[in-house]
Image (tube, rainbow, N blue to C red):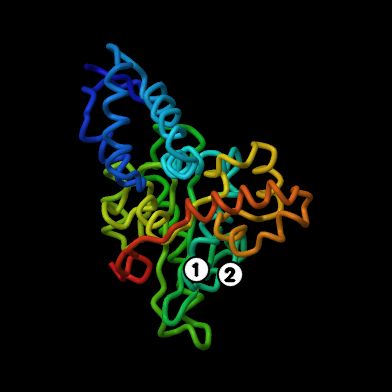
Amino acid sequence: MVITKYTGDKEEFSEEKLISGLESSGIEQPAVTFILSEIKKVLYEGIHTKRIYQEVRRLLLKYSNEYASKYRLKQAILELGPSGYPFEAYVGSIFEAIGYETQTNVIVAGKCVHHEVDVVAEKDDHHFMIECKFHNRHGSKTDVKVPLYIQSRFNDVEFSWRRKSGRRDKFHQGWVVTNARFTSDAIAFGECAGLKMLSWDYPENESLKVLISSYGLHPITCLSSLTREDKKRLLKKGIVLCRTICDQPDILLQIGFEYSKVRKVVREGKQVCKVGVKVGNNLTSKN
């Protein structure tokens, strides 16, 4: 059975890919088996992956909001758009949640010029300049021009950082974080230049998807109990992590949510953000 991808490319439907996607989203085996069985009934030649995704999510909702919310993680990150700023705030919140001191949209003096940096993160002897590349369409890729440009900016910034008291001996590193995928050339250049490359599916076992799921750092846009307008209100207030409203539910009351709605949202948030086994040293690796 041939299916149509978001890019327009055609490929054979893969049961293994569907099963892997469900399992990596934290969906348990009984639900995985049910979904696969039901999806096979609606397949037809040339069916679009968007149609398959919609059907999977509809079926998952029969089990729980938790399953449906976890499965729509990639779509939820797309909903941080259309501008890139909420994604930058989200990336900053991820680093902050795992112990880094962060600043977002900060002006940094380089050797030659000043640079507006999306996120600066610092912990112990690690000091990162993080640039975020947000895509608001499925199938988009970040090509080699992006890491080329960011490496040039990082070289200018690093020169100045190494001349500041207390930072001379730190491990400085440039990062590129995207919600999409990298082209093979982008990855090759990043690895060669020493940039840390983080995308939806790269590095394979320490990707953005793995990081979010392992640390329970899902965006609020995952939550089925929030309307589109609710999500806009929260993002406007700078609230991007489910974990934030789970830890501080009064925030929702303060911006006008009814108590019954707060209980529903927090309940789903706690289900979605269950923390699994943490990945290794993906944020401290010097490779």
Q: Quadrant of residue 71?
A: top left
Mark 1 — residue? 157
Image coords of residue 203 (percent x, y): 29, 54
Q: Secondary structure at mark 2?
A: strand
Please rate how many residues cluster around mark 2, counting C-alpha atoms within 10 Å: few if below 14, some from 14 to 19, many from 20. Answer: some
Q: Are marks 2 and 1 in contact (CB under 8 Å)?
A: yes
Image coords of residue 250 (percent x, y): 71, 61
Q: Residue at x 45, y 38 (%)?
A: 68
Q: Residue at x 40, y 68 (%)?
A: 173
Please rate how many residues cluster around mark 1, counting C-alpha atoms within 10 Å: few if below 14, some from 14 to 19, many from 20. Answer: many
Q: Is residue 230 above or below residue 237?
A: above
Mark 2 — residue? 109
Image coords of residue 202 (percent x, y): 31, 50
Which amino acid does the dot numbered 1 rest on? Val
Which residue is at the far bottom? 165
Which badge, 2 or 1, comes first in the chain's sequence? 2
Instruction: Give 136 or 260, whichever is nearer the viewer.
Output: 260
